[in-house]
């Protein structure tokens, strides 16, 4: 594997200072608290952000409520909201170099990926929902009797958005853009580890013309702020992306106030490689599916099932194919992946691999992080001779780890692929189109790729079934999460 040295050059000048963004103002946390943000590639402290308190949560929700009730945004015609959202997209594009640098250093992403995937994804979300903001239409319903009945679509009010560390920009904009397009106000609580791009987003939204109070950002510790935010009586909807464990807690807490939640949670997705697939392409796809973002991808294809006739051939080819991946130095555009986010995540991945090996798995490649290297770099690792109950198979690893198992029949592999608590994504690699469709339709997952993995677009909904979550982001479905329906019936008599 090509490991390139990591530059310790950290551009601290890029980072916003330790302030919260509430009611259009930058302000210190109410108790003046700060928390350090670390660079995963070096372990260095990048900067400090404000450590919000529950009083700050209350202030942010109050600002969002006041803005919503004033109609300053919720009362604008969709076309006017669209104009401002498209301006947000333009400003993000204009600052893509700076945003890419922030995302790269904060989240440990290679600079090429941070710019091409993360920043472009944010642009795409605002462009897409800017377009849809102009198309929020009601309808007239045919009714018997002398009445005129019509249905209108309305924003919900205040949306609390909570995001995970792995795609800070994309997963916040996939909530903010549709929520704002629909006319809501938003309070964003980004991940404890990766809050920096959200602060820059606040600057951009303000500059684009989003009125004060419509968008607010509170940084801090999720476990300290979460219950207050999620359970706040003035919050009308919670949009949560994160682990299944925290997601279940959030849903339970919001449920006490009967507030709806859209939740995008964990995954442990199966990629099925049939013997009739184009093997070169399928092997490349299988690798991309597990190393993308160092495996810190909710839809990582971490379980590979290979049809028996080509199983040994695939295992023979994986070590060299993995060795050819450039990784490590996040400042080099060609790097495919960088470090894990934190020491905690590194230790978790290392433990799941070692427990799986102790249970009898064979290491095909990887599994040997360099103990002297600063930062949290874990090499791409492939494990064979695994069983469904091995830790790296049964659980979400969230690291660059692939488990490989053979299969003999379609029935058997569909049962294995579905045999997990999760249901986020799936992949079918085959030269037989009918088989691709047939198997895809039986996978219990929110998205399935045939002859590929990971293609995402603002127009294509994603989300999970079972323990992978409720509801969908992206597409018109993502907008509907932030709208409610009201029927108005006018008596035409008298
Ligand atoms: P996490 O669940 O630890 O944290 C997610 C967010 O929840 C963070 O902002 C955190 O501060 C906040 N939080 C923590 N405690 C809270 C509480 N009590 N109440 C409210 N919020 C609280 O997840 P993570 O480690 O940041 O991200 C990794 C997880 O996210 C993985 O399981 C991954 O699969 C999942 N994920 C899912 C998707 C998807 O679209 N399905 C996308 C990305 C990540």
Image (cartoon, helix red, strand yellow):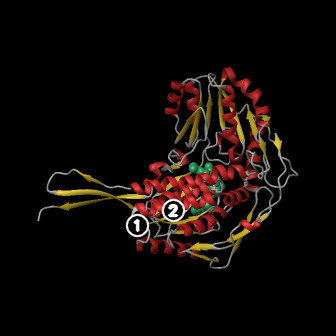
Vertical placement of residue 123 versus 204, above or below: above
Q: Residues within 10 Å of mark 2 (few under 14, many from 20)?
A: some
Residue 10 vertical placement versus 72 (above, below): above
Based on the displayed image, in which of its 4 quarters is residue 147 positioned?
bottom left
How many angstroms separate mark 2 from mark 1 (CA)? 32 Å
Q: What residue lies at 46% left-to-right and 73% top-to-bottom?
A: 67
Q: Quadrant of residue 105?
A: bottom right
Q: Ligand 1 within 8 A of label 2's CB?
A: yes
Q: Viewer-proximal residue, 264 or 249? A: 264
Q: Which residue is mark 1?
A: 76
Q: Which quadrant of the figure contains the N terminus?
A: top right
Front residue of 438/198: it is: 198
Q: Position of residue 32 (x, y in %)?
A: 67, 79
Give me the residue at 76% from left, 41% from top: 380
* Residue 218 in the image, given as x and y percentages of width and height: 60, 69
User: Is residue 84 among the parts visible in the rendering?
Assistant: yes
């Amino acid at each position: 594997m090509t490991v390139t040295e990591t530059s310790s050059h950290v551009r601290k000048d890029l980072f916003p200072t330790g302030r919260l963004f509430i009611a259009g103002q930058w302000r210190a946390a109410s108790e003046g608290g700060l928390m350090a943000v670390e660079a995963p590639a070096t372990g260095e402290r990048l900067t400090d952000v404000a450590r919000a308190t529950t009083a700050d949560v209350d202030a942010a929700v109050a600002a969002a409520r006041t803005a919503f009730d004033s109609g300053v945004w919720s009362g604008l015609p969709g076309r006017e909201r669209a104009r401002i959202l498209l301006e947000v997209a333009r400003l993000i594009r204009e600052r893509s170099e700076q945003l890419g640098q922030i995302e790269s250093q904060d989240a440990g992403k290679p600079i090429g990926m941070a710019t091409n995937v993360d920043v472009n994804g944010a642009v795409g979300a605002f462009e897409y929902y800017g377009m849809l903001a102009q198309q929020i239409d009601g309808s007239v319903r045919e009714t018997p009797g002398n009445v005129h009945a019509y249905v209108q679509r309305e924003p919900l009010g205040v949306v609390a958005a909570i995001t995970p560390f792995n795609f800070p920009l994309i997963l916040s904009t996939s909530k903010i853009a549709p929520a704002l397009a629909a006319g809501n106000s938003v309070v964003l609580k980004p991940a404890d580890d990766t809050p920096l791009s959200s602060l820059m987003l606040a600057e951009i939204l303000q500059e684009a013309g989003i009125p004060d109070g419509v968008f607010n950002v509170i940084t801090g510790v999720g476990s300290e702020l979460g219950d207050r935010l999620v359970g706040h009586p003035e919050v009308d909807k919670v949009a949560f992306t994160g682990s299944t464990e925290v997601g279940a807690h959030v849903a339970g807490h919001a449920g006490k106030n009967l507030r709806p939640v859209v939740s995008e949670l964990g995954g442990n997705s199966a990629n099925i490689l049939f013997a009739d697939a184009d093997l070169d392409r399928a092997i490349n796809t299988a690798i991309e599916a597990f190393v993308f973002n160092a495996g810190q991808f909710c839809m990582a294809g971490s379980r590979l099932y290979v049809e028996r006739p080509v199983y040994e051939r695939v295992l023979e080819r994986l070590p060299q194919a993995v060795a050819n991946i450039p990784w490590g130095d996040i400042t080099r555009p060609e790097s495919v992946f960088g470090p894990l986010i934190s020491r905690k995540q590194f230790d978790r991945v290392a433990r799941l691999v070692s427990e799986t090996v102790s249970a009898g798995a064979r290491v095909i490649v990887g599994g040997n992080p360099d103990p002297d290297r600063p930062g949290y770099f874990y090499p791409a690792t492939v494990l064979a001779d695994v069983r469904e109950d091995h830790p790296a198979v049964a659980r979400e690893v969230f690291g660059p780890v692939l488990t490989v198992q053979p299969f003999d029949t379609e029935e058997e592999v569909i049962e294995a692929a579905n045999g997990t608590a999760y249901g986020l994504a799936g992949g079918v690699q085959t030269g037989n189109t009918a088989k691709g469709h047939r198997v895809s339709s039986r996978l219990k997952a929110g998205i399935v790729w045939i002859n590929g993995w990971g293609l995402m677009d603002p127009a294509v909904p994603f989300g999970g079934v079972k323990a992978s979550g409720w509801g969908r982001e992206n597409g018109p479905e993502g907008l509907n999460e932030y709208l409610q329906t009201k029927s108005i019936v006018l008596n035409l008599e008298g």
